[in-house]
Structures are given as structure tokens and as C-alpha cells.
């Protein structure tokens, strides 16, 4: 009888805690020892009250999903557009949220066409230096940190990218090919000149499954340190799926922590649709695997990164409705902490468990 009573009491307490954590009371930011971030789109922030409230409640900071990229700020040569990013930063300041700038230099097909067309190294270098100066100075004092260069290394052996086109035939900004393989170092120097107070990050994806890329990044950091190139942090994008091996996740987090730099899990999401099929609908098993993966990432980050180097964990969006993945893979997927209606998912509970609130 007594045992039954104790069991009932424990069950009641467990279910209440679980309910409070995932749906009502607790916020991630109030229980997390590291800053909790979200990638934020200003259109949703304005138009969707639930999105806005969830971000305000759970987030310590934001990264602009697209608003601070060259593709938005300088689509046409010489014409800077800061309105969208400024509005986002005003919102962050009013709500006491940290702003992480993303990204000053990126090779991706979304780079402005006029930049991609420059084939002369001095001209491209001068344009990028000027862009970094104008943008760095514009946001000085408002942006705490920058992803200075995004995704320098390729997905093959992990060497510096030198491609003019991607596999779909879309034109790229061939930074390595036009500027030479050491271009990233100079971009960090320009960023430091533009805003000497900003923390400067190198950001990339796939290190957990591509050891060649991971090695190149570590080598670059050692080289930067030896030459006195200013670098303060490393971003692990961590676009993973429910099958991504835990050993790879542990390895990249441990290797980055060992550099002594700030470590930012900068774009976390956990895809469930590993087959990339159009009609995919997750079942209980996938929801559980996703929850476990979120818990593992958060717990591993806390365990392996010294507190003084924990720059935070940012998820790439708030709910499945605003994830980039379905558009990118042309398939259905559900990679984030909240669902299409911004209701909490088991993944959120996994995050709370990783933080250690259970
Ligand atoms: O806004 C236009 C819309 O008007 C148009 O109808 C539509 C048609 O395709 O495109 C819309 O713009 C798209 C934009 O996302 C907003 O949805 C762009 O085509 C598309 O290229 C853009 O994709 C972004 C991508 O970076 C490229 O900039 C994703 O939102 C964004 O989540 C993604 O983020 C990247 C990080 O910056 C770096 N790491 C990887 C991560 C995921 O790819």
C-alpha cells in the first residue's frame, strides 16, 4: 500500500514537471547554463505572435536567418540595405537579447551576383574589404560577435573550396580560386579593423561526419594563432539527423574545445527524414530518436566545453514551420524543437534533459 502511494506520488511529480517544462512554466533560457539562441526571420517575428513569444521566452539571443547576409545587405553594388537587419537588432535590444552576426563572407550561390562575376583578385579583395568595413562599422556596438567567413572547406577532402559552380550548376562566389587559399585570414583581419570589440568566429558544417574538414579547421586555427590573426570562436553548425553517429558529434565538440576558443553550436537542427522522401511522416520511434539526439548534443556540449568557452547553442529556427530543410530537400521534415503549430515536441524535452533539469 505504502509502495503504491510512493509510486503514485513520484509519477504525479514526474508528469507535472514534464508538463511544466515542455508546455508552460520553464523556459530554456532560465535553466540553461549557456546562452540559448535561435535563428530568427524578421517577417515571422512580426507576423506570428506565437513564434515571437516563444523566442522571447526561451531565447537569450538571436542569429538573423538571412537578414545580415551580403545577399540581403548588398544585392546591388554600392547600395547597402540595412533596414531589415536594423529592425531585427532594435527588437533584440528592446528585449535584451544578444545578437550574433551571420555572415560577412560566404561562397554560397545566394551571394550577390555582381560579386560572383568579379574574376580579378585585387578587385574582389577590395570589394570584400570595403563591405566588411561598412557593415562592421554600421553594426559596431550592437552585434556582439560575427561569423566572419562561413564554410571555407569543401565536402570532399575538406580542402579550401575553389569551385565556380555547385553540383546543380548554380554559380558560386569562388573565394579560394580568385583570392587564393589564405583569403580567410585576411577577412578576419578586416573584420577586426572594422569592429575591434566584436568576437570573431569561423563557422562550418559537417565536421561531425567529415574528419578531413575537421582537421583542416583545426589546422587553420593553429595557423591563425601562430600568425596573430584575430579569431575568438568556432561555430559548429550541427545540421544533423537522427542517425548521425554520437562519436562524431563528441569528436568535433572535444576538438573545438581543445583549441581554447569560444565554441558555438550555431545552427542546430535534427532531421528525421533520413530518406528525404516527399510523403515522410514521423512515428513515435523517430520522435524519440530526435529527442535523444537533442539531449545528447546538449549534454555533450555541457560536459566537454568548459563553462568559460560555452558561447551557446543556437537552433536554426524555432519550429518546424520555419525550418530551411523542407525547401532545401524538397521533402517533408520536422527538425526543430516546436512543431508546425509551435507546440512543444519531445525534442524540447530532450533539450531540457540535456541541460540537466530532469
Ligand atoms: O524570399 C524569397 C521568396 O521571395 C521567393 O519566393 C523564394 C523562392 O525560392 O525564395 C525566397 O528566398 C529564399 C530564402 O531562403 C528565404 O526563404 C532563398 O531563395 C533561399 O536561398 C534562402 O535560403 C537560405 C539559405 O541559407 C541561403 O541563404 C535559408 O533560408 C537559410 O536557412 C540558410 O541558412 C544557412 C546558413 O546561412 C549557413 N549554414 C547553412 C544554413 C542552411 O542552409
Image: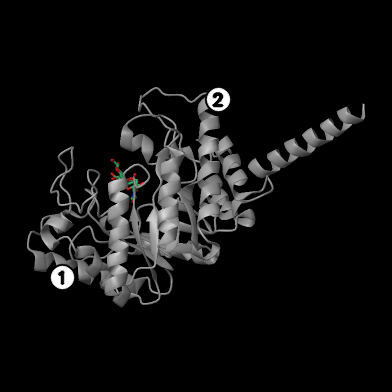
Contact check, label 2 and label 1, Cβ < 8 Å: no
Front in this rendered view, residue 235 or 213: 213
Residue at 55 percent of width and 42 percent of height: 295
Quadrant of the image occupied by residue 6: top right
Q: Position of residue 354 (x, y in %)?
A: 58, 46
What residue is drawn where x is 32% and y is 51%?
A: 214
Q: Is residue 17 above or below residue 36?
A: above
Sequence-first disc among 2 and 1: 1
Image: 251 above or below 224: above
Q: Which mark is residue 140?
A: none
- Give residue 149's position: percent from left, percent from top: 29, 60
What crowding class fits label 2: few (fewer than 14 Cα within 10 Å), some (14-19), or many (20 or more)? few
As helix, strand or loop, the secondary structure at mark 2 comes to: helix
| Colouring chosen for the image of the structure | one colour
Q: Nearer the viewer, mark 2 or mark 1?
A: 2
Per the rendering, the mark at residue 284 is 2
* Residue 5 falls in image quadrant: top right
Tell me the SS state at disc 1. helix
**Residue 231: x and y, percent?**
35, 68
On the image, numbered disc 1 is attached to which residue?
Answer: 126
Amino acid at each position: 500500500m505504502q509502495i503504491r502511494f510512493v509510486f503514485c506520488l513520484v509519477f504525479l511529480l514526474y508528469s507535472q514537471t514534464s508538463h511544466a517544462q515542455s508546455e508552460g512554466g520553464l523556459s530554456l533560457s532560465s535553466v540553461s547554463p549557456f546562452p540559448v539562441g535561435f535563428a530568427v526571420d524578421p517577417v515571422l517575428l512580426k507576423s506570428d505572435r506565437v513564434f515571437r513569444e516563444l523566442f522571447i521566452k526561451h531565447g537569450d539571443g538571436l542569429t538573423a536567418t538571412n537578414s545580415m547576409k551580403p545577399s540581403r545587405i548588398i544585392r546591388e553594388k554600392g547600395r547597402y540595405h540595412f533596414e531589415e537587419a536594423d529592425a531585427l537588432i532594435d527588437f533584440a535590444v528592446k528585449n535584451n537579447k544578444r545578437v550574433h552576426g551571420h555572415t560577412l563572407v560566404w561562397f554560397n550561390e545566394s551571394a550577390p551576383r555582381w560579386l560572383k562575376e568579379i574574376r580579378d583578385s585585387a578587385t574582389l579583395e577590395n570589394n570584400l574589404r570595403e563591405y566588411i568595413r561598412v557593415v562592421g562599422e554600421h553594426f559596431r556596438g550592437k552585434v556582439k560577435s560575427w561569423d566572419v567567413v562561413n564554410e571555407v572547406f569543401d565536402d570532399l577532402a575538406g580542402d579550401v573550396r575553389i569551385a565556380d559552380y555547385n553540383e546543380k550548376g548554380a554559380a558560386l562566389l569562388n573565394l579560394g580560386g580568385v583570392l587564393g587559399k589564405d583569403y580567410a585570414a585576411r577577412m578576419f583581419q578586416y573584420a577586426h579593423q572594422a569592429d575591434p570589440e566584436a568576437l570573431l568566429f569561423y563557422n562550418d558544417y559537417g565536421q561531425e561526419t567529415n574528419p578531413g574538414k575537421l582537421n583542416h579547421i583545426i589546422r587553420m586555427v593553429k595557423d591563425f594563432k601562430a600568425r596573430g590573426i584575430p579569431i575568438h570562436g568556432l561555430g559548429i553548425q550541427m545540421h544533423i539527423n537522427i542517425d548521425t553517429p554520437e562519436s562524431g558529434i563528441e569528436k568535433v565538440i572535444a576538438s573545438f574545445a581543445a583549441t581554447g576558443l569560444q565554441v558555438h553550436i550555431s545552427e542546430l537542427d535534427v532531421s528525421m527524414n533520413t530518406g528525404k522522401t516527399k510523403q515522410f511522416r514521423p512515428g513515435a520511434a523517430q520522435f524519440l530518436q530526435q529527442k535523444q539526439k537533442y539531449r545528447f548534443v546538449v549534454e555533450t556540449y555541457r560536459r566537454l566545453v568548459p563553462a568559460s568557452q560555452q558561447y551557446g547553442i543556437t537552433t536554426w529556427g524555432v519550429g518546424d514551420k520555419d525550418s530551411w530543410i523542407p525547401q532545401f530537400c524538397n521533402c517533408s521534415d520536422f527538425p526543430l524543437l516546436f512543431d508546425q503549430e509551435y507546440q512543444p515536441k519531445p525534442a524540447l524535452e530532450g533539450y531540457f534533459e540535456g541541460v540537466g533539469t530532469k
